[in-house]
Image (tube, helix red, strand yellow):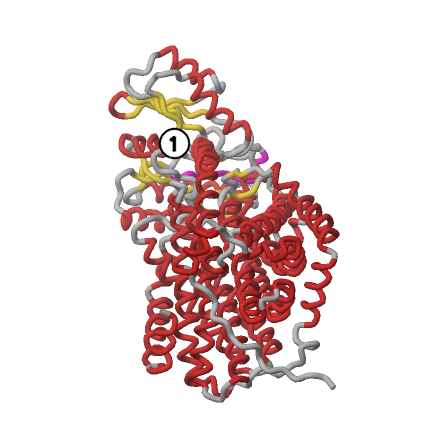
Amino acid sequence: MLSTLARAATRRPLTVIGLWAAFLLLGFGLGTGVFADLSDDVPDVPGTESDLADDYLSGVDPTGESVTAVVAGEPVSDAALRAQIERTVAEVRRIAGVADVPDPYTTPGLTARDGQALVVPVTFEGGLSDEAEEAATDSAVETIKRIDAPDVHVSGGELLGRQLGERAQEDVKNAELISLPVVLALLLVVFGGLRAAALPLVIAVSGIAGAFLGLFAFSQVTDISVYAIQVTTMLGLGLAVDYALLMLVRFREERRRTDDVVEAVHRTVDAAGRTVLFSGLTVAVSLTGLLVFPSVFLRSMGLAVAAVVVVDMLAAVTLLPALLTKFGGRIRPSKARSLDEEGRVFARLARFAQRRRIAVLVTVVPALLLLALPATGMRIAIGDARQLPSSTEARQLYDTVDAHFPKGTGVSPVLVVLKPGTDSATADRVRALVPDSESRELPGGNTVVELQPPGSVDGKAATGLVERVRDVRGDEPVEVTGVAARLVDFRAMLAGRAPWAALTVLAGIFVLLFAFTGSVLIPLRTIATTLLSLGAALGVVVWVFQDGHGAGLLGGEGLGALSLTAPPLIVSIAFGLAMDYELFILARMRESRQRTGDDHEAVVTGLRRSGRVVTCAALLLAVVFGAFMTGGFSPILQIGLGLTLAVLIDATVVRMLLVPATMALLGRHAWWAPGPLRRVHDRFGLREAAAAEPSVTTKA
């Protein structure tokens, strides 16, 4: 298949380039439409009690979405300001589609005790079309924003998703402006020429277009989280650079062996292209674990990121060969180096780890386990507006309310739906759980009880209240929903499906690595060492963003818990990225072993030949992740830090020390497989094409 793709790309390079140019136009044209349709609803899990109860309420509750405005900065009792606000409230009430706007001066709890702020909630009618609701929201916001006060902020409901989408688009643009020049500068250092350095950026731009287009396609059938934009774009950019870097390094080596550019391209695709193919497959397989979860967010993220990985992989084995066919003759071959000079630092590290394998293991493994220790106390939460950058409208509204109103103001209540037939004693027990609980009657004999929890919307008090309601209801037709209930159900979903997700990913990775190596021990060793680096990275993220150690240095703060989006994405994506580097190294090891039959020297040669590529790739990925962390969204900060640490730890400590140490410990048994599996591999396994040792100079 790869040979066919390579021949097609070299026979019709302009056609291939033209098709990819059309894809780019489509991605940056149609694909960017996803920014207008982003959701901040992450914890919904179809089929759970909270989801079903919410759907039920939507069908019987005549009220619709709402937005909240806060006015602050001067005494709200000032006659001129009060007249403005009362006039504004009257105008908003007259907007088509608005159901209710309470008077903030006469409604208890809407005016701050210090007299410096007030809240104006606006509730819209239920059953509005998307266009009607958007028009009503825009009119209400425009009217409220005309209030002449130092601080006027409006957010919530459909408006919040729109505000976050605009911020996400700005963050992506800024990250690209930061990362692309830095990546180009680093590639210039690696390749020493502008032509070779520019080609990975072309592939990277293709990855970004693929991210936009993939997300847009999925947005037509499901909700796309605002956080999906940054995650998929950073992965699309980073992996594209990784794959192009590997291919270009191999192409420059092949150019030393032949002056025929087309032949060099064919050899590159036959050799490094297989590594790219398996690398893309391992990343995609790592993301299949997300498909095990019924969460719409996790499934859509898994599919979207997998789609981006496929785009990057296809660009590396089709677009890049076409570009090399047209412009590769102007790219200088890599310099011939003596065996002593080529990758000597990595060779020395490999030999050191082989000689001191026990010392390396008893030093590195406990150190990584120590870093992973905080992960044992990890907590996840939906979070509040503190996760957002201080410049966002929602965060400014939150900070203003927090500064002037009692703690817990604005916290979403636990909603208890008492359906027809509910025993009155059960209803009384539910109401007794929280003093001053409020009830409202709905059509059809339904009653909604609003229980206001103390503390945060997803704190222990709120989630504990959900559990108590579910305990006291017995077999009565009572259902619980609301933000806290969705978090409880999301956590239960993660706990129940996580073992199956892990089993799916590990089995898939094992099969792919076995197909690549023909060994059953190398996949097991790879999985074990990768889990060490992954645990260490996750432990540091918990220590920083949950416990608050140094979070301010990264533009965040300790929130007492991680965003519920961060751990599953860090684990699945980082696991796939770690497989990237493992395959880069294993490919070179297999080549050397097939050529020489020396198991010991194959490890040294593998690291000597791939160490520079792996290190450069990890550094480039870290630059990309770091650029996306400048946006300030706490979930993105958590995901970015986790992936950066996982990549750097894996590419350095694990691949440069643990891999040679464990391979030396296994010795010739590392490549072992039982007879039946060996025959299966001989028949069906795919492998890196063995290449001749490049010509090198020798010292006198």
Percent across and percent down for residue 48 are: 37, 32
Extreme residue in the front direction = 675
Q: Amino acid at mark 1?
A: Ser
Quadrant in the picture for residue 522: bottom right
Closer-to-camera residue (136/218): 218
Q: Is residue 167 visible?
A: no
Q: Kindly identify which residue carries mark 1.
A: 50
Percent across and percent down for residue 275 are: 48, 66
Residue displayed at 43% across by 63% down: 686
Apparent side of residue 82 relative to residue 426 in the rendered image (left or right): right
Percent across and percent down for residue 51 are: 36, 34
Q: Is residue 481 above or below residue 528?
A: above
Closer-to-camera residue (105/487): 487
Count of numbered circles on the image: 1
Closer-to-camera residue (434/136): 434
Quadrant that contains the N terminus: bottom left
Q: Is residue 689 visible?
A: yes
Quadrant in the picture for residue 377: top right
Quadrant that contains the C terminus: bottom right
Apparent side of residue 634 relative to residue 417 in the rendered image (left or right): right
The residues colored magenta run: 114-122
Q: Callout 1 environment at 10 Å: few (<14), some (14 to 19), or many (20+)? A: many
Residue 85 lies in magenta, yes or no? no
Percent across and percent down for residue 259 are: 49, 89
Closer-to-camera residue (174/660): 660
Q: Is residue 651 above or below residue 60?
A: below
Residue 118 lies in magenta, yes or no? yes
Apparent side of residue 649 relative to residue 290 in the rendered image (left or right): right
